[in-house]
């Protein structure tokens, strides 16, 4: 009798598990059909993502069903797992299909609303200057009129011109791959990280005395965001002479460039001691400002300071590396052009300067520049 009773109880458990499992799968299949019917009516990706989360998300119905597998035997777990994976696969296929339909619908609406009549007569408008182009031309013209040489050099450089000649030692972090783009399969060849290498080439070619300014593209291994770009422009200035040049000359030159770029004489600069391998002493340059109507204005009575760039007296080793062994004096400074332009025009995202959308380009264009 006991054996018979045990047999009856085991059979009851088996029947219960089988019935529960069957109804459980049927319930999920019904949920799947409801889900498929809902997403067919959805016409935006945001709504589609929200509905998918209810079924496939961390707290979704199917995910909860997968958690129940841990309470089953190995055999039941295997059998039920196959069915659940089938439901999941069906749902994911339907989601992908509906997402494509939504994207195509959005594209069709855009194509129908944004029409271009190619038969319209051509206008005489030839466009406007980008503000970067405008500022580069403006600075070049000004310094050329002051007697400076306007120079540039190759953007693909050697380690000698980019690092060695500038007194940057082999162990300096800037030489590592996380900051510098090296050319694959070419030893010691890289994309220049600064326009200071133009100064080295100029000293080797023209010697002393020398007054030059260079504006060109530089490259660093930075992630593109609102304030950083892997490609940007630098302004570099170098003045070298056999007659004594001191820090006072450098400060005056910095006042001139900042006043000219921002088109104001109301400039007050602060100089902080710093370190650059190619200058000694070295200084960071800050300008005094305050915000007026949400825009930065350079004023002498401001309440905040903003870093502009670096400067200093040229290190003697730089002259030696260029083959100049006589007693000479010189100063140099460098600024990021995009940073100056963003401050001047109130631009908060550097990516706007490189956008290809004509509407954004026109908003930052200089008319009749």
Image (tube, rainbow, N blue to C red):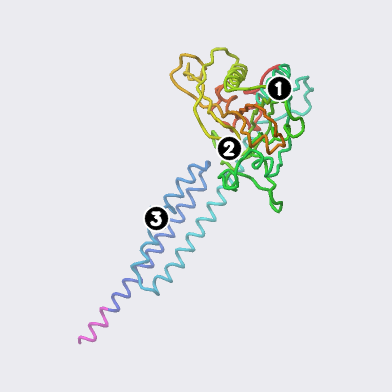
Q: Is residue 359 visible?
A: no
> In terms of secondary structure, what is the magenta stretch mainly?
helix
The alpha-carbon separation of the residues under discs 1 and 3 comes to 66 Å
Q: Secondary structure at mark 3?
A: helix
Q: Write the start and end of the magenta stretch as one range.
A: 1-9
Dot 1 alpha-carbon crowd within 10 angstroms: few under 14, some 14 to 19, many 20 or more: some
Depicted 267 relative to depicted 192: above or below? above
Q: Which residue is mark 2?
A: 277
Locate residue 149: give its quadrant. top right
Crowding near the residue tagged with mark 3, few <14, some 14–19, many ≥20 C-alpha atoms within 10 Å: some
Residue position marked by numbered label 1 in the rendering: 140
Residue 273 in percent (x, y) is at 50, 29
Residue 96 lies left or right of residue 20; in this view the side is right
Along the line of sight, the residue nearer the viewer: 1 or 345: 345
Residue 37, percent from left and from top: 49, 50
- Side of 247 relative to 128 (left or right): left
Residue 156 vs residue 91, the one in the foreground: 156
Q: Which sits earlier in the primary sequence, circle 1 or circle 3?
A: 3
Residue under the point 46% across and 14% down: 301
Q: In the picture shown, does residue 33 fall above or below 327?
A: below
Place of residue 245 in the rendered image (x, y in percent of width and height, measured from the top left): 63, 22
Residue 2 position by quadrant:
bottom left
SS under mark 1 = helix
């Amino acid at each position: 009798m006991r054996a018979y009773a045990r047999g009856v109880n085991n059979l009851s458990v088996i029947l219960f598990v089988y019935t529960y499992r069957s109804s459980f799968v049927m319930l999920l299949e019904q949920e799947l059909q409801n889900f498929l019917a809902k997403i067919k009516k959805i016409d935006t990706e945001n709504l589609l993502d929200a509905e998918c989360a209810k079924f496939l998300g961390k707290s979704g119905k199917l995910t909860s069903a997968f958690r129940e597998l841990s309470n089953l035997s190995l055999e039941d777990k295997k059998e039920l797992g196959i069915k659940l994976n089938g439901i999941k696969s069906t749902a994911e296929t339907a989601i992908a299909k509906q997402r494509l339909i939504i994207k195509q619908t959005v594209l069709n609406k855009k194509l129908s609303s944004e029409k271009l009549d190619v038969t319209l007569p051509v206008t005489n408008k030839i466009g406007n200057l980008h503000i970067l182009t405008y500022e580069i031309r403006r600075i070049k013209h000004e310094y050329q009129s002051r007697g400076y040489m306007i120079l540039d050099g190759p953007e693909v450089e050697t380690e000698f011109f980019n690092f060695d000649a500038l007194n940057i030692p082999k162990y300096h972090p800037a030489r590592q791959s996380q900051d510098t783009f090296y050319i694959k399969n070419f030893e010691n060849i890289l994309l220049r990280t600064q326009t200071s290498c133009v100064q080295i080439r100029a000293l080797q070619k023209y010697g002393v005395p020398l007054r030059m300014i260079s504006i060109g593209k530089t490259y660093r291994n930075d992630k593109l965001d609102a304030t950083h770009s892997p490609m940007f422009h630098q302004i570099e200035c170098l003045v070298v002479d056999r007659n004594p040049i001191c820090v006072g000359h450098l400060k005056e030159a910095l006042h001139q460039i900042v006043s000219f770029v921002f088109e104001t004489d109301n400039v007050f600069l602060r100089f902080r001691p710093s370190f650059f391998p190619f200058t000694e002493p070295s200084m960071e340059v800050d300008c005094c400002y305050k915000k007026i109507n949400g825009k930065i204005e350079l004023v002498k009575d401001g309440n905040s300071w903003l870093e502009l760039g670096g400067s200093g007296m040229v290190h003697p080793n730089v002259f030696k590396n260029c083959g100049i062994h006589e007693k000479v004096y010189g100063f140099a400074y460098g600024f990021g052009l995009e940073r100056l332009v963003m401050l001047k025009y109130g631009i908060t995202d550097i990516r706007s300067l490189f956008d290809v959308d004509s509407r954004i380009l026109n908003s930052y264009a200089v008319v009749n520049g």
